[in-house]
Every structure is written in C-alpha cells, then in structure tokens.
Amino acid sequence: MALSKPKGRLFRKYVVLFVTLVSGALVTSGLVEIYFSYQENKMALGRIQREKAQAAASKIEQFIKEIERQIGWTTQAQWGARSLALDQRRFDYLRLLKQSPAVTEISQLDTAGKEQLRVSRLAMDVAGSQTDFSQEPKFVEAKAGKIYFSPVYFRKESEPYMTISMPRSGEDPGVTVAEVNLKFIWEVVSQIKVGRAGQAYVADSRGRLIAHPDISLVLQKTDLSGLPHVQAIRKASPRPGGDGEEAAIAKDFQGRQVLTAYAPIAPLGWLVFVDLSLGEAFAPIYASALRTVLLLLLGIALSVLASLFLGRKMVTPIQALQAGALRIGSGDLRHRMEVKTGDELEALAHQFNSMAGQLQESYAGLEQKVEVRTRDLTEALEQQTATSEVLGVISSSPTDVQPVFDMIARSTVRLCDSHFCAVFRFDGELIHLVGHHGLTAEGAEAYQRGFPLRAGQDSAIGRAMLTRAVAQIPDIQADPDYAQHAIARAVTFRAIVGVPFLRDEKSIGGIAVSRSQPGPFSEKQIALLKTFADQAVIAIENVRLFQELQARTQDLTRSVEELKALGEVSQAVSSTLPRCSTFARPTISTRRSSRPFGRCLFGRAKASWVVRQSRGSPRRSPTSRSLTPTRAASEIC
C-alpha cells in the first residue's frame, strides 16, 4: 500500500487554526480588557467625584447647622423687665453678627408677626417698625414650631441669600428671622478640583444654580431643572448617605458630555454636583485601548510566525508516525518509531512502539496463554466432576456416610494441591476422626492418636467447630494459639485450613486440609471446600433420615406383631371357655411379642386346671397353683 502525501494540507490547516485561535484569543482578551477597564475607570472616577461631592455637601450642611445653632442662642427666653428685654435682644443680635459673618441681618417678630427689632450690617438698625410679616412663610412656618429655610434669592442681583427663621421661647414667644449670605458656599465649591477641567456646583431644591466657580452663571440664575439627570435625581428623592449610582454620563447645562456625580444636602433639599468632561475622564481608557490594539497587532504577527514554526514541527513527526503505523499495520512488528520532540508526539510514538512490542509478545506467548486458559478450564471441570462424583456417592449410599467422607477426602487432596485431608464428626464436645486420605501408615497412626479432640483454639478444626466459620492457619509455627505441633511433625505439614459442617447453624463435623509449605489457601480452594462441606452435610442428613425411617418402620412392625399375638390369645380364650368340660388338654400358645407369654399346656385335675407343660414362660409360672376353669381363663387372658 503506497503512502499518500497530501503536500501542504495539514501544514496550512494548522497554521490557519493557530492564527485563528491566537488572534481570536487576543481580540477577545483585548475587548474584555477594554470593557472592564472602562467600567473600572468609570467607577473609580465616579467614586472620587461622589466622595468630593459628599465632602462639599457635608461642609455646606455643617455651615448651615452652625448658623442654625448660633441663631438658636438668640431665641432663648429673656429674664428681667420687659423694657430691658428689647435692649438685651439687640445686644444678642449684635453679638451674633460679630460671631457669624454669613448672617447679614437679623430681626425679631412678635406673636402677631409684626417686626419689633431689626439689626443689619448693610442698613440702619430699626426698632418697633411694626412691619407686618404675619402672612409670610418665614413667620407661618416658624410659628408652627418648625425651622424655616427659604428658597435662595439674590440680594440686589449680586449675591445669593437665604432666610432662616426659628420660633422663640419665653413669656413673649415670637419668631427670629435671619438673612444669611451664601457666599461661603461659593468658596467651598471653588476649592473642589476634579482633574484639569472638572468643576463642582450646587443647585437648590427648584433646580436653580446657587453656587458655581463661575459666579456669572449664578448671577444669571441658571436653571438646571430641565437637564435629564437632574430630573431623574429629583424624582428618585435621594437621601443623604444613601447608596446610589457612583457616576453617570450626562450633558451639563452647557451641552457638554460629562461624567457627573452628586450628593444631597439635608435638610435644604440642595444637590452638589461634580462634573468631569468625558474626554478627560476616559483619557486613560483611550490610552489603554490604543496600547491594547498595538499589542493585538503585535500578537497576531507573532502568532503567524509561531504557527508557521509549530506547524512544521508538528507535521514532520506526524508524517513519521503515519509511516511507522503503516509498517506496523503491514505486519512488521519489529519496527520502532524514532520521534524526538519531547512532547505528546514523542509520547505517542512510545505508545505505538509499546503497542508493537505488546503485539509481538502477544503473538509469541499466545500458546502459553492458551495453555494457561486450558489449565484453568481443566481445573474447573475437575472440580465440577468431583462435585458430581460426591453427589453420585451420596445417592448410591443412602445408609452409609463413610463412602462420602472417603470420596471428599480423595477429591480434596487432588484438587486443592494439599498434603492430606481429614474428615471429622463433632458431637458437641469432642471431635472424632472419621476419614482421611494422603497419609502414610505411620502418619495415619500418629494422627489417629490425637483424637478424639476437644474443640478449642489449639487446632484449625477446633476453631472451625467453635466459630462455625472457616479457620485458616497459613503457618502453624507462626500461630501462637496452635498447639498440635506433635501431630504436625508426625504428618509434616505447615499450613492447614478447617471448614465446618453446619446444620441449623450448629457444627456437626468438618474438613481439615493441610500441606507441607506455608501459605494461605486460595479463595477458589476455600469455595470448593465449602461445597464439599455442604455435600457432606447432605449425606449426613440423608443417613440420619434413613436410619430414623428404618427405626420407625421396625417399631411399626413390632407393634403389628403384638397386635396379631393379642388377637390370637383373645380368640383362643374365647373359644376355650365354652368347651372346658369336653376336652382334657387345651393348649394356648403365643408368638414372640414385646411381652411373651411362652407356651403352656393345661390338664384337668378334678375341678381345676393345672399346667402340664410350659415353654418360654416367665419365672412366676402358673404351675405354682391350681386354677379353676373360670379363674384360669380369666388369668390367662
């Protein structure tokens, strides 16, 4: 058969396959790397921006709370005369303006909502103006016991302000109203730096810009409520410290694509935003993507070169394997392949060589294997034949178990490759030798002197009788409990096994097999001994049942003979009594029974009967006295 060589096909296939696999892996890895890098950078930037927004929101919230706390000092009840209360209140307001620069004006409203005092940084102080603010939210909300925060407004269209009003306590409760300059918030957001061009800003609850690094945008009252991301945040009603999206891509109020994060300010409902343009935010991602593309192109080029090299390295040994397989397949089992690649191809060549060697050995040793298999089959056939022979002896000798024992002993010695075999009967205490095979006359005599033997751990058959299981001693010299060394020396054996005869879970006998060399008996030999033991139990049981049946038959025969004898006696007596005067020498006889009467000859002497002759009668014979006819008949009966 000619070796076909499709030139180049396998080589091209491997090159294309390697290039595709490597390129696909590189492309997939690059795309995955770009995607995860994008997500990780986005999340990292979002976390940074959110942390900065939360820091700014925290500062603004602390600023409002500090002002609220300072205003709260001025709402405490006044002690002393009513005429001095207004002056004391004015003094407190001046001290508040000095301590809190953000508060530009503070006023006191009475319970009716009329202004009683106003202290300002930007105007003259006013006392008792009685201006009515009873309908203003700053009075209504505070009068209800709440702290009021007004919407942000611009004073003189220059700076953002907010009104804070709080209820007062004391005998004359009212409301304290403070005007707070929110320029501090502008200072806070101006200090936040995000990247090169990032910025932070604050929107109030209505979405208007109230703080931005570019103050002109605040003064223009820029409205952010129309932006989609601001609307989504207001609908979601964010809570301070709540979990939310780290960052989102949106358009700012100037229409630029930005990466934005926010943080709420409680309780004002304001939002602090931190924006970073997408170009600057994703610049590391773009650089990483460019590096990935360059590495991808370089990897593809290297994969092509590696595929060409590996393709050639693989095709050459494969062709050698193909040629070697063809020679081995054609029958040249001595051929060996020489492949030196140091990888799986070399291992494959070794496997082919090993296969060829095994085939060569298989052909060379085929006859030996057939012989071994034939020997195994012959051994199995011999075992089956021996079993059949034992069963034949059992069926042909129902009244005597000894031929069965002899057959078992002979078959065991032949099939178990043993030195000798002995068969025993067990009466519950002592073990009796009933058969053996394989011993010389001297050995048999020495062996028989050791029996009967009491069941115990000092012998293999004794252990089998006690445990009702197979007892095997691979080496009697190494067994500390074995004590029958005198018998072992006389018979010259080292290994022995005992198998019990079990009937109704009781030991009634057993088989002991020994051999001169130490070592355990095989499982097949143990199984054969168990089979012989079961057949011996069947034979013993058959003989026992036969003997019981024979004894019962004899008992029935004797009972029938007794009944016949009694019947004859009764018939003789009944026939003799009416004719006692007509003959002088009646004779009554009985045959042998369980209680024999013997044979008696009676004669008449005057008015009585006397025994004239007897044979086989009991010691107390009727000859010791005379009987009347009636009395004699009754006593005889």
Image (cartoon, helix red, strand yellow):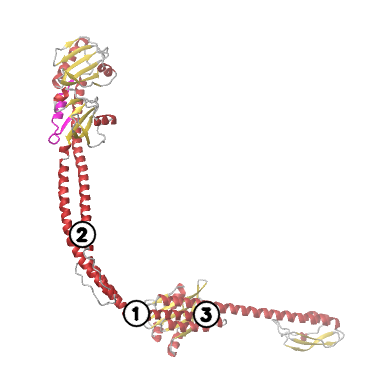
Amino acid type at mark 1: Leu
Within the image, what quadrant is residue 311 found in?
bottom left
Q: Which of 555 and 190 is in front in this view?
A: 190
Q: Where is mark 3, residue-wise?
A: 391
- Examine the rendered structure and indicate whether residue 125 appears above or below residue 161: above
Left or right, residue 599 beside residue 130? right
* Residue type, numbered disc 2: Val
Local packing at callout 1 (Cα closer than 10 Å; few below 14, some 14-19, many 20+) is: few
The outermost residue toward the left is 196
Residue identified by numbered label 2: 15
Report x, y in % for residue 337. 23, 73
The residue that mark 1 highlights is: 366
Distance from label 2 to label 3 (Cα)?
Answer: 76 Å
Amino acid type, label 3: Leu
Q: Which of marks 2 and 3 is in front?
A: 2
The answer to whether residue 434 is seen in the rendering is no
Instruction: In this rendered view, identify the residue nearer to me: 72 or 251.
Output: 251
In x, y percent, where is residue 116?
Answer: 21, 11
CA neighbours of label 2 inside 10 A, class few (<14), some (14 to 19), many (20+): many
- What is the spatial separation of the Cα atoms under label 2 and label 1, in whole angstroms? 46 Å
Instruction: Quadrant for the C terminus, please.
Output: bottom right
Q: Where are the magenta residues, as a range?
A: 180-200
Foreground residue among 602 and 399: 399
Residue 555 in the image, given as x and y percentages of width and height: 66, 79
Decide: is 490 above or below 69: below
Q: In this view, does 7 lie above or below 120?
A: below
Quadrant in the picture for residue 170: top left
